[in-house]
Image: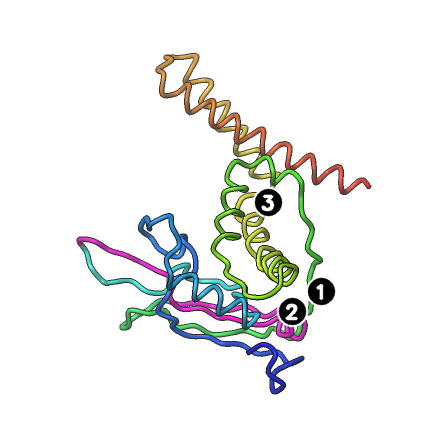
Amino acid sequence: MAADSRIVGKPWTVLGDFNQTLTHSDSSVSLNPNTDLLTRLFRDCLLYSELVDLTYRGCSFTWWNKQTSNPIAKKLDRILVNEDWHHKFPSSFGYFGQPDFSDHSPCCITLNLIVQRHRKAFRFQNFLLLDPNFAPMVADQWLSINIVGSAMFRIAKKLKALKGCIRAFSRDNYSDLEKRVNDAHAEVLQLQQQLLSAPPSTVADLEKAANEKWQTLLQAEESFSVRGLE
């Protein structure tokens, strides 16, 4: 589809209800850690079409089953764009509103042509390797992508697909580093105070985990600081 002469070199978008999740985080309930066939097919379709999610605001999930005893929410609606869209409308973003009378969120796109920004080049930060959740995330994404073609073609396509996952992981875990470091440090100090006041074993485990999290964020912040001085 992405190679169709009618759309090559042109910005385009596909949006609406796809009735299918793309990742495990697209559901409010725990799913089977193994990626099912429908999810793999959906991922392959987007990869083949060279479409990715447009940055959006509003609701994280776009559908729910409207049950009070067992409420389940999922992201079934998406706003997908190609690379040319990002170049043509770098400041555009999507919005998912409240369902109101429906069980799906309405969605729209704001082009925001007044303020233009340049798309940042992809950079891999070595400190991501220190995060224990990073390697499993990459492995899960890598193994779930099914590409047909030569070995070099498959590797190139998989690496391109991983860029969005790594960007999202960095944004979700390491954006606003200074505040995250301060909050993590404050949590460590609070747990240490509890530990030294009345030391139950559970607090010791929490303090250890909080300290490890703080050290990881601190190393990430220092890595950014060093890069900024180069």
Q: Amino acid at mark 2?
A: Pro
- Sequence-earlier tag: 3 or 2: 2
Above or below, 6 against 25 in this view is below
Q: Amino acid at mark 1?
A: His
- Sequence-earlier tag: 1 or 2: 2
Gap between marks 1 and 3, in whole Å? 20 Å
Gap between marks 1 and 2, in whole Å? 7 Å
- Sequence-earlier tag: 1 or 3: 1
Q: Is residue 72 magenta?
A: yes
Name the residue nearer the viewer: 98 or 67.
67
Residue 38 point in image, percent of width and height: 37, 64
- Give the label on residue 176, or none: 3
Name the residue nearer the viewer: 146 or 176.
146
For the record, the magenta segment spans 69-97
Instruction: Look at mark 1 in the image and give the residue it sits on.
Output: 118
Residue 41 point in image, percent of width and height: 43, 66
**Residue at 48% across / 28% down in the picture?**
210
Instruction: Look at mark 2 in the image and give the residue it sits on.
Output: 90
Q: Amino acid at mark 3?
A: Asp
Q: Quadrant of the N terminus?
A: bottom right
